[in-house]
Image (cartoon, grey):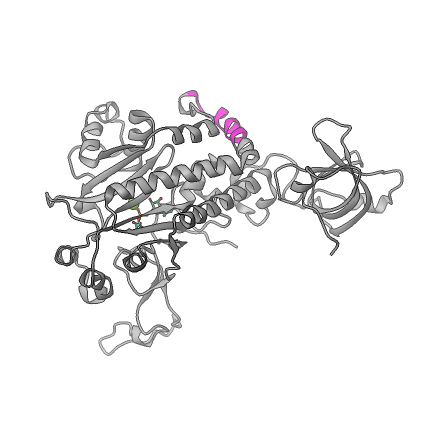
Amino acid sequence: MAKRIRVKDIFLAETDKNYTVMGWVRTFRNNQFIALNDGSCLANLQAVVDFEQSDPALLKRITTGASLKIEGKLITSQGKGQSVELIAENIEVLGDCDAEIYPLQPKKHSLEFLREIAHLRFRTNTFSAIFRVRHALAFGIHKFFNDRNFVYIHSPIVTGSDAEGAGEMFQVTAFDLNNIPRSEDGSINYKKDFFGKHTNLTVSGQLEAELGALALSDVYTFGPTFRAENSNTSRHLAEFWMIEPEVAFADLTDNMDLAEDMLKYLIQYVLGHCAEDLAFLEQRLLEEEKQKPQIERSEMALREKLTFCLEQPFERLTYTEAIDILKNSVPNKKGKFQYPIEKWGADLQSEHERYLVEKHFKRPVILTNYPKEIKAFYMRMDDDDKTVRAMDVLFPGIGEIIGGSQREERYDKLLKRMEEMHIPAEEMSWFLDTRRYGTVPHAGFGLGFERLVLFVTGMSNIRDVIPFPRFPGNAEF
Ligand code: 4AD
Ligand code: MG
C-alpha cells in the first residue's frame, strides 16, 4: 500500500505538502467534512472534500464506519476546532459500511451496550483511549522492571500445581468428555490424559517466580491468570493479567517499598505519556458523576486523584491496627457495614478496605501482618505464631490492588504450615527444594493489571478495561 502517515503524526507535520492517510470515518458533515480516525490518537483529522468536483456515487459511500484512503494537501485550518486539515484530492473507499445497520452511530452509547459489541467498541473515543492507556501501562511495567535489572520470567499457563488454587481453577484436559478413561476403582484416570496428570489453568505465576528469584535474584512475571470463582462483581474477571515481582534477599519492608515505587512510577508514566487520553477520560468521568447523587460523587477529578496518590506516602499499618479502627468506626457502630467487624480474625471485605482508604486515611493504604488463617500457606510466620508477613495495598475506589508477602523461607516452618493446611508435600517437592538448597529470605507481590487500569482510567467496571472480558456466563469473541 501507499506509504501513509498516522493521524497522530500529521498534526505535527509540515503544512502545504501532500500526505496519504487511512482510517475510519467518524462523521461526514454537509457532504464536505470528513472526520477520520485511525486510532493513533484521540483526535480526528478533518479532511475537506470538494463536493462539486466529486463523483456523487463516491460521496454516498463516505459513511460513518467506512474505511478510507485519502490523499491530499495539508493546510493550516481555516475553521475552528483543529489546527490543520487535509484538502482531499483523492479518496478511495477501502471498505464500505452500511450506515443503516452499523451498530456504532455517531451518538452516545451506554457502556453496557458497547460491552455487547466489544468487537467494535475499539472504534469509540472512550475505548480507544482506555486501550492506549492500557498499552502505556503495560509498556511502563516492563520499563520499570527492566530499568531495575529484573528478569522477565514466563511462568506456565497450564500448571500441574493446584496448591494456590483452592478450588477456583479451570481444568485443562484433552479427554473426550463423553468417554473419560477410568481406573478400576471408577476414578478418572488422569494418567491417560495429555500431560499424564491432572492439570489446570494457572491462578498465579508466583510459585514459579520464586524458583526464578532463588537464582536470578530479581524477577517478575506478567501474564494471564484464571480464576473460576463465581464473583460477578465490577472488580473481578475470570481471566485477568497479573504482574508478580519476586525478590531474593528482601523482607516485607523492601516489598512495600517496591510496590509503592512501582505504583507511583506507573501513575507518573501514564500522566506523562497519555495526557490527551487522560484529559478525555477525566471529562467522561465528570459527566458520569453528574448522574450520581451528590454524596456519591468523587471529590477529585481524575488527574487530580492520580497526582494526589503520587504526592502522598502510602499509609502503612498492621491488620490488628486496622481492625481497631474499623471496630470503632461510625459505620460499624451504626450497623452500616454489610459485614460488621466484631472481632480480630475477621476477613476484610471491600467495604472495609474502602472505608480505610477513602474515609479514614484518605490515601492509599498498605495493610500488613494478617492472621495466618486468612492468608496463603507460603507467607512467612511472625514470631507470635498468629500473624504472617502479608501485605495488601488498598486503593481508592478499588480496594485491594496488590496482594503479596514475605515468603516462608524456613524449610521446617513451611512444611508444618503445609501440613496444617492439607497441602500434600509430595506434590510440592520442587517448591520445597528451594528451601532445602540455599534458601534465602525473599518477598514478592501480585498486582492485578486490570485493577490498575481501572484506577488510572477512572472507569467503574473491570469489564470495560480488558478488550474481551471473561466472567461467569460470558466468553464471547
Ligand atoms: O491477592 P492475590 O490472589 O495474590 C496472588 O495471587 C499472589 N500469588 C500474588 C503474589 O504474591 N505473587 O491476587 C493478586 C492481585 C489482587 O490484589 C487483585 O488486584 C488481582 O490480583 N486479582 C484480580 N483481578 C481481577 N479479577 C480477579 N478475579 C482477581 N483476583 C485477584
Ligand atoms: Mg489477595
Locate the N terminus and report the quarter of the image it occupies: bottom right
Residue 313 % position (x, y): 33, 30
Q: Position of residue 96 (x, y in %)?
A: 73, 50
Provide the residue span drawn in magenta: 282-294
**Residue at x-position 21% and y-position 49%:** 379
Q: Nearer the viewer, residue 318 or 235?
A: 318
* Residue 61 horizontal side relative to residue 146, left or right: right
Q: Of helix, strand and loop, which mostly describes the magenta segment?
A: helix
Compared across the picture, whether 306 is left or right of 444 comes to right
Quadrant of res 55: top right
Inspect this view and state whether residue 460 appears: no
Asked whether 409 or 295 is in front, the reply is 409
Identify which residue is drawn at 37% across, 68% down: 173
Q: Indicate left or right for 205 with 86 as reference.
A: left
Magenta-drawn stretch contains 289 = yes
> Residue extending furthest right?
53
Instruction: State ligand 2's quadrant.
Output: top left
Furthest-top residue in this view: 294
Q: Foreground residue, 187 or 43? A: 43
Residue 403, x across and y down, in percent? 30, 44
Left or right of 211 in this view: 288: right
Q: In the image, is residue 405 above or below residue 81?
A: below
Please state the horizontal and vertical placement of residue 82, each as a whole percent of the image: 70, 31
> Quadrant location of residue 409?
bottom left
Q: Is residue 96 magenta?
A: no
Q: How many marks?
A: 0
Residue 163 appears in the figure: yes
Q: Residue furthest left?
A: 384
**144 over 430 or under it: above or below:** above
